[in-house]
Image (cartoon, rainbow, N blue to C red):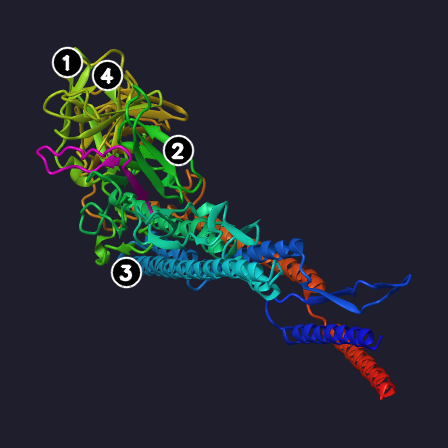
């Protein structure tokens, strides 16, 4: 009996000792990250049957088990990832929000100051006030350029910082991945050595490592036996058993300044789609870079390109104080194209602005792909911001105001360098514009505030007919010798360069088949009819199988839009087709050819227009073009256009009255072009002609501000959700010091009682021994 009592006391003593150790372990790790409270499980030992009575044999110690809920753990991991994503994105976008919304460094005040100075010049073009106003325009232009440049440089700094942080996140992900893999191995070994008993502290360390990993990227855990398989993003395996697929930061194949995340596969690195790496700090950085930072850089660039291009175009239509035609006031970087380092050819894309009002805030991916079956090879152009794709079998091809072409070789004449199948290019129309914009004009006298044309009605006229002062509406004039067809006014695109028409371009009509000759050898010409564009390269001999087809003469179709060198026009049968040998000429509209128009009362018309000039009369919404040499009817209040200039006639003319049109001898005292330049501030020249410079910038600032506020709210909400998930987990798994103190007292009393029992058993044993003596 005493021995049995002694055994019972000993089991109770051992159980109490383990209870005290467990409670002490909990207390010691109350503040250890990821620690889960442990509980000692014990039960009554199997009783002995002693003559019909079952006599207890003390206590049996079971396992020490951690209190852990996988469901709550998964909730903490998921909310931790969401919170880190929103917090990271919010912190990054706040920099942009503070930058563009600041009234001292923002662009909007600079735009206002610049155009206010132009308005002052329009109000006071003469004398001392005019000289001061001219200097003010130059200074304000330089200040505006400096503001945009400063923002562009700051955006580049933020981009470099994001690239560095992406690298740091990848390093942390790899460290935690290796740690989890090592713990997988350690847990497996521990369980094998202990016949399957759970190594609680190792399990806590692994769960905590997973939770830390979720701060950097979205994590999915798949249990396999005693191991965790970890998948990140949208399913990329990071850990499978003990195998770790390390991530690596590499330079983009099409943009060496941009870091990409890749995974290792058989010794090589495969880039991951950024959208597949959602959640966590890494997901927040990638989303910020793609959705906000790129948009910011391109929005500032689009604004810089629009201001520079529109102002330059109008400035070139003016005349400076020296009587010279205005030149470019601003300079800004052109679109840039970067070929992939994986390309197998030396081809590249030559991109240029064709219509800055249509520019987007996206970059573009251009791929040269093989056609399926008998279909020809083709170019696929993808707008990266939304994934929208368009295709074309040949270049040039225009997308969102940017014309894409192939660079030329050094041949005579130069020919496009053809890409190979699967070659890829990154076209960035406005990426470099913000950091490159600057003012070219340093001499205030070269500000083209005047217009190069003057119109007068002499005092000898007997009627009351009037004519407006006249305006230049195109830098290129069109004329023809055709008595059957007319050539339209020339539209000058944003890619037009003055040296394109250093000499007049004479196009001669030919038959069998109908075509136009005279384009320079090597010229790329696009013909658009019914929305379908055909591209041709002018060559010494026809080669229809080339890409694009090489032709000696460009095919002619009445009414088709013909584009070459940044200008576009159409030739239309009027009333019939051109005759072989008739010519159509494009030439610079400045300087102005002096012209005297004479009114004829019998026909109620004007004659005397320059030889070869097709004249267009617009009255309200009605527009009519008259062939060269034809009498042009007089309609009061109508606008007459020819050779790149226009004016409005009104009043009562008497037979023989004349109108004189001549070059402006000097730009002094003329504010007409300055007024046109000032009007650019409120003209809708951006986002497909829907808003002004300041309107577009305001939309961008609003977009950033709204997104910043949205992420601020989301970050606060995700923080609250994480706190709630942590609270729920801690209520289940956390250490309660009051509870553990009570457990200590309980186990202490049990220990003392078990010791007392063993003491009694010893005394009983001693009594039995004394009886034997």
The residue wearing badge 2 is: 389
The residue wearing badge 1 is: 580
Residue 209 sits inside the magenta stretch: no
CA gap, disc 2 and disc 1: 42 Å
Local crowd at mark 4 within 10 Å, few (<14), some, or many (≥20)?
many
Q: Nearer the viewer, mark 2 or mark 3?
A: 2
Give residue 703's position: percent from left, percent from top.
50, 50
Q: Secondary structure at mark 4?
A: strand
Q: Nearer the viewer, residue 167 or 748?
A: 748
Residue 426 sits inside the magenta stretch: yes
Q: Nearer the viewer, mark 1 or mark 3?
A: 1
Q: Earlier in the sequence, mark 1 or mark 4?
A: 4
> Magenta residues, as a range?
405-430
Q: Secondary structure at mark 1?
A: loop
Which numbered tag is attached to residue 135? 3
The residue wearing badge 4 is: 485
CA gap, disc 1 and disc 4: 12 Å
**Where is the C terminus found, in terms of image quarters?**
bottom right
The quadrant in which residue 687 appears is top left
Q: Secondary structure at mark 2?
A: strand
Q: Nearer the viewer, mark 1 or mark 4?
A: 1
Q: Nearer the viewer, residue 708 or 244?
A: 244
Give residue 45's position: percent from left, percent from top.
79, 65
Q: Earlier in the sequence, mark 2 or mark 3?
A: 3
Q: Determine whether, in the image, residue 102 is placed left or right of residue 562.
A: right
Q: Earlier in the sequence, mark 2 or mark 1?
A: 2
Q: Residue furthest right?
A: 52
Q: Nearer the viewer, mark 2 or mark 1?
A: 2
| In contact (CB < 8 Å): disc 2 and disc 3 | no
Q: Earlier in the sequence, mark 4 or mark 2?
A: 2
Q: Earlier in the sequence, mark 3 or mark 4?
A: 3
């Amino acid at each position: 009996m005493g021995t049995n009592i002694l055994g019972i006391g000993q089991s109770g003593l051992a159980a109490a000792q383990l209870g005290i150790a467990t409670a002490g372990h909990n207390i010691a790790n109350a503040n250890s990250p990821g620690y889960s409270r442990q509980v000692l499980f014990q039960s009554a030992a199997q009783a002995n049957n002693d003559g019909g009575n079952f006599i207890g044999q003390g206590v049996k110690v079971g396992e020490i088990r951690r209190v852990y809920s996988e469901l709550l753990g998964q909730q903490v991991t998921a909310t931790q990832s969401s919170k880190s994503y929103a917090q990271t994105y919010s912190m990054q976008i706040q920099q942009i929000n503070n930058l563009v919304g600041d009234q001292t460094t923002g662009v909007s005040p600079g735009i206002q100051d610049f155009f206010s100075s132009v308005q002052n010049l329009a109000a006071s073009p003469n004398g001392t006030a005019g000289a001061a106003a001219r200097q003010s325009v130059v200074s304000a232009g330089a200040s505006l350029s400096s503001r945009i440049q400063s923002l562009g440089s700051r955006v580049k700094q933020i981009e470099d910082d994001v690239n560095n942080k992406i690298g740091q996140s990848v390093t942390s992900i790899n460290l935690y991945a290796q740690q989890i893999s090592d713990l997988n191995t350690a847990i497996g070994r521990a369980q094998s050595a202990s016949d399957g008993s759970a190594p609680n502290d190792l399990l806590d360390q692994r769960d905590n490592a997973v939770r830390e990993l979720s701060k950097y990227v979205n994590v999915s855990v798949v249990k396999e036996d005693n191991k965790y398989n970890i998948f990140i993003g949208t399913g990329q395996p990071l850990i499978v058993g003990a195998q770790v697929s390390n991530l690596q930061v590499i330079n983009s194949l099409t943009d060496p300044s941009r870091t990409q995340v890749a995974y290792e596969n058989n010794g090589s690195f495969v880039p991951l789609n950024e959208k597949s790496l959602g959640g966590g700090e890494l997901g927040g950085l990638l989303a910020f870079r793609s959705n906000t930072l790129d948009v910011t850089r391109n929005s500032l660039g689009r604004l810089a390109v629009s201001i520079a291009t529109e102002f330059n175009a109008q400035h070139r239509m003016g005349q400076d104080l020296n009587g010279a035609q205005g030149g470019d006031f601003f300079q800004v970087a052109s679109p840039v194209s970067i070929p992939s380092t994986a390309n197998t050819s030396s081809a590249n894309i030559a991109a240029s602005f064709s219509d800055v009002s249509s520019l987007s805030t996206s970059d573009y991916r251009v791929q040269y792909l093989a056609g399926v079956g008998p279909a020809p090879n083709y170019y696929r152009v993808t707008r990266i911001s939304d994934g929208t794709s368009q295709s074309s079998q040949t270049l040039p091809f225009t997308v969102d105001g940017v014309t894409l072409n192939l660079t030329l070789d050094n041949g005579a004449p130069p020919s496009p360098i053809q890409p190979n199948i699967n070659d890829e290019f990154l076209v960035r129309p406005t990426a470099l514009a913000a950091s490159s914009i600057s003012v070219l004009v340093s001499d205030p006298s070269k500000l083209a505030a005047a217009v190069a044309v003057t119109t007068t009605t002499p005092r000898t006229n007997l009627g009351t007919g009037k004519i407006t002062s006249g305006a230049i509406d195109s830098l290129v004039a069109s004329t023809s010798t055709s008595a059957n067809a007319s050539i339209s006014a020339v539209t000058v695109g944003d890619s037009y360069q003055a040296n394109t028409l250093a000499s007049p371009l004479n196009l001669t009509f030919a038959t069998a088949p109908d075509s136009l000759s005279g384009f320079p050898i090597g010229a790329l010409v696009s013909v658009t009819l019914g929305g379908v564009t055909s591209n041709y390269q002018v060559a010494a001999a026809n080669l229809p199988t080339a890409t694009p087809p090489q032709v000696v003469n460009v095919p002619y179709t009445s009414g088709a839009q013909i584009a070459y060198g940044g200008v576009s026009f159409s030739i239309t049968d009027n009333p019939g087709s051109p005759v072989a040998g008739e010519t159509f000429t494009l030439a610079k509209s400045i300087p102005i050819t002096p012209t005297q128009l004479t009114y004829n009362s019998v026909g109620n018309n004007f004659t005397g227009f320059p030889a070869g000039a097709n004249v267009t009369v617009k009255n309200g919404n009605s527009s009519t073009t008259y062939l060269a040499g034809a009498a042009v009817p007089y309609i009061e209040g109508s606008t007459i256009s020819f050779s790149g200039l226009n004016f409005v006639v009104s009043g009562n003319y008497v037979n023989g009255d004349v109108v004189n049109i001549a070059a402006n001898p000097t730009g002094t005292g003329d504010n007409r072009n300055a007024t046109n330049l000032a009007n650019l501030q409120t003209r809708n020249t951006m986002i497909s002609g829907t808003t002004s410079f300041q309107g577009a910038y305001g939309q961008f600032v609003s977009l950033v501000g709204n997104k910043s506020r949205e992420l601020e709210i989301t970050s606060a909400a995700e923080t609250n959700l994480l706190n709630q998930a942590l609270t729920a987990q801690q209520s289940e798994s956390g250490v309660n010091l009051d509870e553990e103190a009570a457990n200590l007292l309980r186990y202490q009393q049990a220990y003392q009682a078990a010791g007392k029992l063993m003491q009694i058993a010893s005394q009983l044993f001693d009594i039995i021994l004394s009886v034997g003596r």
